[in-house]
Image (tube, rainbow, N blue to C red):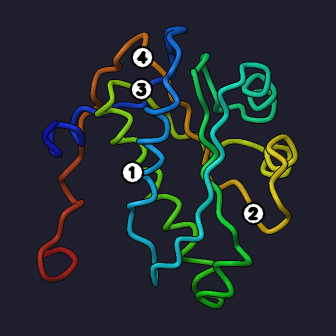
Amino acid sequence: MDLYDAIRGRRSVRRFTPAPIERTVLERIIEAATWAPSGGNAQTWRFVIVTEPARIAKLKTVSPGLIGDPGAVVAVCQDFADARAKGSTLGEVLLAPCDAAMAAENLLLAAYAEGLGTCTVASFTPRAVARLLKLPETVEPVLLVSVGAPAETPKAPARKTEGVVHWEVYGG
């Protein structure tokens, strides 16, 4: 799949078919996530893949943005103690969340290349998610990504370019 086609074609999918996702496919999309850039090459991200329907249902109770019935949910997490140890305050406060976001984008594009739909979710109760996933104290969820066979492909929203792109200086 052409990279630009993947970037333009990927959508946030919130309705999924009940088709199961093969473990090898999930492993491939997580591997793609680990190839994302990482500030100082710290690689302090952690991923928890949830496929058990009962656990997904529990996650949905503390994640209002987790809609539909995905075949899997990936918790994109960060070990903030490790990030601080490797990059001081900058690593913990700025680089770790950016790294998680870049890893999530790789995951989204890889899932799309596999024919899967995804939706990134930031509306959840972090402590509850951490408890449900038995995360260590230093590891916190940053994003949840629902993954599944899409039941629909939403239409692409218009993209704004006016006033967004500037050359050399702001306003140029």
* Local SS, label 3: strand
Q: Nearer the viewer, mark 1 or mark 2?
A: 1
Sequence-first disc among 4 and 2? 2
The residue type indicated by label 3 comes to Gly
The residue type indicated by label 2 comes to Val
Figure check: 140 above or below 25: below
Identity of the residue drawn at 50% across and 22% down: 21
Mark 1 neighbour class, 10 Å CA radius: few under 14, some 14 to 19, many 20 or more: some
Marks 4 and 2: CB-CB under 8 Å? no
| Quarter of the image where one finds residue 69 | top right
Q: Which residue is mark 3?
A: 117
**Which disc number belongs to residue 139?**
2
Rendering coords of residue 163 (x, y %)? 22, 60
Query: Along the horizontal axis of the image, is 82 left or right of 161?
Result: right
- Disc 4 to disc 2, C-alpha distance: 30 Å
Q: Which residue is mark 1?
A: 32
Residue nearest the observer in this picture, 66 or 104: 104
Q: Which residue is mark 4?
A: 150
Identity of the residue drawn at 56% across and 77% down: 94
